[in-house]
Structure formats: structure tokens, C-alpha cells
Image (cartoon, rainbow, N blue to C red):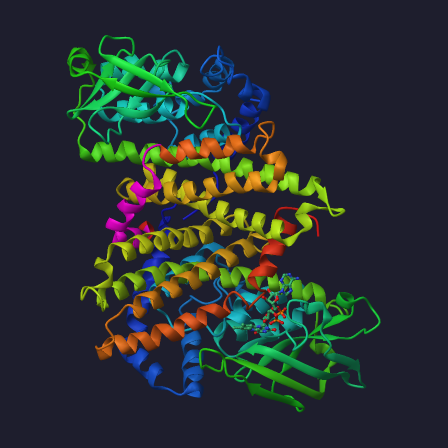
Amino acid sequence: MDLADDPGQARLRRDLRAWLAEHLTGEWRAGYQAGDEGQRIALLRQWQRALHQAGFAARSWPGAYGGRDGRLIEELIIFEELARADAPPDVFRIGVRIIGPMLMQLAREDQKADFLPGMANGDLLWSQGFSEPSAGSDLASLTTRADRSNRGFRINGQKVWNTLGQHADYCLLLARTDPRAVPHKGLTAFAVKLNSPGIRINPLRQINGRRDFNEIFLDDVEVPEDSVVGEVNGGWAVAMTMLGFERRGVAVMGFACGRLFGRLLDLAGSVRLRETGAPAIDHPPLRDRLAALGVQARIAVLNNYRFAAMVPEGGVPGPEGSIQKLHSTELNKAMHDFAFEIMKGADLNESAARDLFDFWGEEYVTSIGMTIAGGTAQIQRTTIGERALGLPR
Amino acid sequence: MDFSDTEEQRLIRTSAAELVRRLVPPERVRALFAADAPAYCPDLWRGLAEAGYLGTLVPGDGGGAGLGFVEMGCVLEALGGVLASGPYLSSSVVAVEALRLAADEEQQGQWLPAIASGEKVLCPMIDDQTGGGFAPVAYAHTADALLVASGGHLHIVDPTAVGVAIDEFPSLDPTRHFAAVAVSSAALAAAARLAGPIDAAMTARLMAVGAAATAAEMLGVASRAHELACAYAKERQQFGKPIGSFQAIKHLLADQRVALEGARSAVYAALWALDGDPAGATVAAAVAKTAMSEVALRIGAEAIQVHGGMGFTDEVDAHLYLKRAQMDAMAYGTSDHHGRLLAERLRDLAQWTRLT
Ligand SMILES: Cc1cc2nc3c(=O)[nH]c(=O)nc-3n(C[C@H](O)[C@H](O)[C@H](O)COP(=O)(O)OP(=O)(O)OC[C@H]3O[C@@H](n4cnc5c(N)ncnc54)[C@H](O)[C@@H]3O)c2cc1C
């Protein structure tokens, strides 16, 4: 156990910081802020390409698939530094952290060669098409169908809450191929090109005003035989592998919590309270609550490093992913709740405070979604109870 | 950055757990409750000495193992898990650190090998918050000497000397003996003292050592209470099913596990910091102690709840874990103390050490 960086890790951190200082300029941020949605996605593709070229994307992947043969811990160091630097949103996370690692375990060699390098370098944006209007937590009950056709499969049905689908190139989609089998045995995973005929994508307005997720309507969508990922009727294994990686992926939120604590201190230092006329941070009850959140934020960061040391390189994360996800997403909510608590007491006669009120209000609402996405907090508790504690169903 | 156990740490963790499970079966814990029982079990003390654990922190040339705080934490976690009685934390951890900080060579030669061999027990009294005395102090009357902080020095006081009052009082925790200790100024003046003075930074260091070590013990306590609750949830049937199949119980136990894992991260980070990042150790120890206290108290109380009416009978051990946690929560700074410390040092708290 050594919680200090070894020389190689320290070099990686230094290199990344220097790289970020050079590339993540005020100018870049301003351009990003000013862009509309389409321009932002284009900028984020460039951003991913640049990160990848510099060796900071998909670092733990094999070189043959666009990675750097790095260790998992290096990837965590990169995530931590990106969080610290308030790097732009990682829209490639679904490919790089969830679908890509699954492909490495379950896909054919030609699929790995076709898809993985593009996921890593920003060419291919992927989304995940699991949930349906009547199948969320109970994923195995999904009803979108894929029937044999002369060229491969014909897909009909509807997906929902599909994040980033309106901008994505591909969707990893789960559909029912054997309606007679027990629910989770009749599913197959497909790599579907989102510009295929018969696909209609409808962005949904979220409670935070953004339109990040979509409905996808599939109407006689023809997909070739070789778009099957894993075995026909082996979709459940694909889904479970992805969910394992997704939990670990969301757990990177631990680093975001670490960063968020620093932002809360800045906020509390800059906002003056209506009642006292002094900065929120001078108000002892608020300081006490900040300290309590800071304790948990530090734990979230530590958990990431400790849990990473428990998963063997190349292994699928077990229920410990759920533990991390539950801790960091609940904490993320509590910290945003606190930020808005500060804003509720702020002197809103100042226009700067009103801007912050608006900003943190939206962030607060956004944080609520994170205990729903990727398996709700309740489902995580059940998973932990049954798989980590061995409690009966 | 490597948060995994070394081979040696893994070995200590498993062999310490095995040893204390063998030496302290549950009936041993309860045997000590009898009025005429010894304060702690001599078998355990001998066993710990033979395994070299009493000298984990004692340097190699002082007859010890010369290991670090993480290794020490592995032993203390194991001791906490079986509710072991004995002055391990005070004598082999805090007193050893005090000797390393303030004793001269001769004094170290006199005490360190004797602590490592189990021949002598030192009872440190560092945390004088009132100016008038120390309470609660664990195992004061059975110690060979008290190590009393006063006037910038650590005094080596004979517990039977004139002017020393040791008032044992019944604490919530029946597994240990606590006393209020008062040492008169005449007794202090007559006592020998460690050669070096002890300043505020050293006191803070000793408090951090004590807090992190107490948190390590509590980690063992809370983990075991959680295991007992999980085991009962699998075995106890109501409505024709094991109670662990009910979501109210399942989710409560899952939340315990989440909290416990987080506290574990904090505890081992604090133990590591005592050796690896001394400048950050006070904040790291405060994080560990507040987080661990909250978790251990909650799990202790919930473990009783999960056991239902059986949990309220003396016969089931769950309450012993809660009571141990309550007394541990008082040692080396309450949550209130550490919480205030952190509230005063919010920027340090934000500074996860390796990020500088
Ligand atoms: C921001 C966001 C992004 C998302 N992105 C994607 C995506 O990219 N791709 C995708 O496929 N899906 C995505 N989802 C969907 C997400 O996976 C589902 O919303 C989630 O799995 C819950 O399903 P549901 O919405 O149908 O809720 P339901 O399953 O209907 O649950 C409703 C409530 O009941 C509770 N509940 C349900 N079953 C149980 C049970 N057995 N025990 C206890 N409580 C239970 C739930 O916890 C919840 O509180 C996203 C969701 C959000 C919010």
C-alpha cells in the first residue's frame, strides 16, 4: 500500500497537467460555451482525437485496438486529473468505458478491429439502447424484436432514455430474438448503425432543460447477420458485462465529487448570505456541513483507487462497482443539494448571484438523474445485498 | 498510487485475524465481565507478544518488527473484530509513538523492548482537555507506568504513587476497564520524565496516531457487527422466508456495506498517511475518525434492530459491538472535535494529498 504516485505515475500526472494547460485554454472553453449542440459535439470529437493522440484516451486498451497497453490505475489517474481540470464532458465514455471493454471480452476479432480504434480516437460515437418504455429496471422483459430476414435480422420496437443517440454513429441495442425462451435467454445484442433506414430518433426534453437522451423508434430496420455481438440469444451476457463496466464507469463520479468539493468551497466563499451579509463560508453551520461533505468526497476519491486495486487487470468488475456507484451518485446528489442550499440563502439582489442561482439549480436537478441511470439506487442496493452480502432473493 | 496490500500486509492481516479468533472466542470476552476476572486475558497478551504484534511499531533494534502503521492497523482491526480486551492501542501504539518522539536512547532502551515483549505496559495520557485530569482512561490501574502529558513534558508516573488517584467507573462498554485519573502536581514533580519536550505539533501527532488507530479498531468492530447482522438475516425466518429477503432489511444491510467500505478507505488512508504523508496525517486521521465513528455507531445500533427481540437480550453479542463503538467514539477526539478541526481546515480537506 502506497498512496503516493510512483515515478511513472507522477510523470503521467505531470504530462497530462502540462498538456491540459496547453490545450484546455480559456479560448477553447469560450468556443465550446458559444457553440450550439452540433458544434459542441464536433468540438468534443476533436477533443477526443487530441486526447487520444496524446495517449490519454483508452490508455488501458491494447495497442492493437487503439490503446496504450497501460494499467487501469493510469486510467484512474487520467480521470482524476481531467476532473480536476474541469475537462469537457466525456461523450465517448459509453463507448470507451462500457461498450469497448465488453467487446474485448465477447465480440469477434473483426468487430474489435472495426469498432475499438474508432471509439478510442473520436471517430465513432456510441450509445446504449437497452431501456424501453415498459422495461427499465426489469430489463429482461424488453419487447423490441429482431426476427430473421434474408439478409440477417429485421428489428421492430422502441427504445427510450437513450443517451446521445441523436449524435451517435452506433447503438449497442438489445432485442428479443427468441420470444419462446425465458425472458433473459431470448435476447441478442446488435451493433446497429444509427443512420440505417427505418430508425427515427426523437430527443426528449429532460427535467434540467437539456435534451441528452432520446426515444428511438425502429421500424423494419434491416441489420446484417454480422452485426450480432456475442452469441445469438446470448444478449444477456452482453448486457450484464456492460452493466458491470457501466457501474465502474459511473463510479468515476467519485473524482467528480472530489472536484465538486473544491467548487463548493469556492462557491461558499464567493456568495454572500442575505441574512448575514457575509460570505456563506463564514457561517459556522454551513462550514460544519461542508466538512461532513468533504469527508465523504475524500472517501469517494479513495474508494476509486482502493476498488481499482481489487479488480484484476482485464477482469469484469463485480458488485463492488455497485458499492462505488451508490456511494458516489448519492454523494453527488447531496453535494449539489447543498450547493443549492447555499444559493437559497444568497443575496439575490446581486446579478452575479442570480447567475449562480440559475447555474446551480440546473446542476442540482441534473444530479438527480444519476441515481436512476445505469440501474437505480434501489436496484444497486438489491445487487449489493444479493451479490456482495449473499442475502437471499 | 497503489491501494492494495503488500504480501506482508496480507500475511499480517490473515494471521492476526486467525490468532485473535483462536485466543478470543466469544465466551472469553464474556468471562472478563465477572467481578473477580482480570482486566484482560493474559493468554491473549502472551500470544500477541509471541507473534511479534506488540512490537509491530517498535524499531528492529528495539526488539520490535519495525513495521508501519498500516501493518499495525491490520492487527488492531483484527482485535476490534473479536472485541479483544487489552491495552494494545495505548501501550503498543500511542506510547510507542510517544517514546519515539520524546524519549532519549536510554529511555527507549528501557521501555521499547519491554513493551514489544509484553513485559511492560505503558498507559499514555495525552489528551487533557480539562486541565484537571484524564477520563476516560483505559487500563490505567494495570499499567506499569502512566505516561502523563503536562507542562510540555511527558512524565513517567507510577500508578501506585502517592498523589495518583485512579477511579474506575462503569462505562457503557463491559469489555474494557475505564477510569478517571488525576495526578497531583507533587506526583508529577516527583516523577521522571521523557528527555525531550513535547510541543503542540507532537501532541497533534500523538492525537492523530490515537485517532487513526482507534478508527482501525472500530473498523474491525463495525465489520463484525455487520457480519453478524448479515448472518442473522440469512438464518432467521419470518413470514416463511429469511428476513434478509425483505428489501427493508436487504437495503439496510447494503447501505451498511457501502458505508463500511468508505470508512475502510478512510481508515487505511489515514494509517498510511502517518508514515507516508505526515503533514497530511492530522486531517486524514480526523476524516477517518469521524467517518468511522458514524458508521460504527450506526451499524452497531442497526445490528441490534436486525436481530429484533433477540437483539435486545444480553445473550446476543450485537449490543457489545455498539457499546465498544460508543466508547471508541470518545477516544482521541469525538466526532465533534474532529468535525470542528475539519471545518477549520476546509482547504486542507479539499487537498487530497497526492494532488499537489
Ligand atoms: C440520465 C439518464 C440516462 C440514461 N441513459 C440510458 C441509456 O443511455 N441507455 C439506456 O438503455 N437507458 C438509459 N437510461 C434509463 C435507465 O437505465 C432506466 O431509467 C433505469 O434502469 C430505471 O428504469 P425505469 O426508468 O423504467 O424505472 P422503473 O424500473 O420503472 O423504476 C421506477 C422506480 O421503481 C423502483 N423499482 C423498480 N424495480 C424495483 C425493484 N425490483 N425493487 C425495488 N425498487 C424497484 C426503481 O428504483 C424506481 O425508483 C437513462 C436514464 C437516465 C435517468
A163 or B324, which is in the foreground?
B324
Whole-percent x, y for residue B218 in the image: 45, 35
Q: Is residue A214 visible?
A: yes
Quadrant hosting residue B209: top left
| Number of marks drawn | 0
* Span shown in magenta: B331-352
Quadrant hosting residue B154: top left
User: In the displayed image of the protein, which residue is found farthest to the right?
Assistant: A180
Q: Is residue B309 left or right of residue B269?
A: right
B22 or B251, which is in the foreground?
B251
Residue B291 on the magenta span: no
Whole-percent x, y for residue B233 in the image: 65, 42
In the picture shown, does residue B151 fall above or below B291?
A: above
Quadrant hosting residue A44: bottom left
Instruction: Determine the main secondary structure of the stretch shown in magenta.
Output: helix
B253 or B350, which is in the foreground?
B253
User: In the displayed image of the protein, which residue is found farthest to the bottom?
Assistant: A197
Residue B337 on the magenta span: yes
Q: Is residue B335 left or right of residue B37?
A: left
Whole-percent x, y for residue B247 in the image: 64, 54
In the picture shown, does residue A193 fall above or below A67?
A: below
